[in-house]
Image (cartoon, grey):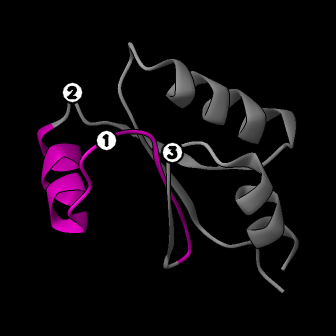
Amino acid sequence: MAAPRITLYTMRACPLCRQAKHYLQRLGLRFQEFDVHNNIRAQKAFARLGARSVPVIMIGETRIDGFDRKRLDGLLKS
């Protein structure tokens, strides 16, 4: 089974974004990061999600708002 696509919407000054990024890296997972402060395409994608704050973690089509390690672990195991 292929690993799910992981997308991380962040902002540089966000401490929870850094935690989420480091956690995914520590697990050895590949992910695509989009800085919604500096990237117009990322801003548009973020707006389409209807998100209001960062981080937003997309695992496949499933969305996690904020850094919820318990929920993230559950999704990654399934």
> Is residue 58 rendered magenta in the image?
yes
Sequence order check, earlier mark of 1 and 2: 2
Check disc 1 and give the amino acid type: Ser
Q: Is residue 13 left or right of residue 24?
A: left
Sequence order check, earlier mark of 2 and 3: 2
Q: CA distance from mark 1 to mark 2?
A: 11 Å
Q: Are marks 1 and 3 in contact (CB under 8 Å)?
A: yes
Q: Which residues are magenta?
A: 40-60
Q: Is residue 43 above or below residue 20?
A: below
Where disc 2 sits, the SS reads loop
> Residue at label 2?
37
Q: CA distance from mark 1 to mark 3?
A: 8 Å
Count every numbered label the image shows and give the total.
3
Q: What residue is drawn where x is 49% and y is 79%?
A: 61
Q: Position of residue 32 (x, y in %)?
A: 51, 48
Counting other residues with Cα less than 10 Å from the Cα at mark 3, is it few (<14), some (14-19), or many (20 or more)?
Answer: some
Give the farthest residue toward the bottom: 1
Counting other residues with Cα less than 10 Å from the Cα at mark 1, is it few (<14), some (14-19), or many (20 or more)?
Answer: some
Q: Position of residue 36 (x, y in %)?
A: 25, 36
> Residue at label 1?
53
Q: CA distance from mark 2 to mark 3?
A: 16 Å
Residue 3, picture quadrant: bottom right
Image quarter in which the N terminus is found: bottom right
Check disc 2 and give the amino acid type: His
| Nearer to us: label 2 or label 3 | 3
| Nearer to us: label 1 or label 2 | 1
Image quarter in which the C terminus is found: bottom right
> Residue at label 3?
66
Q: What residue is drawn where x is 63% and y is 36%?
A: 20
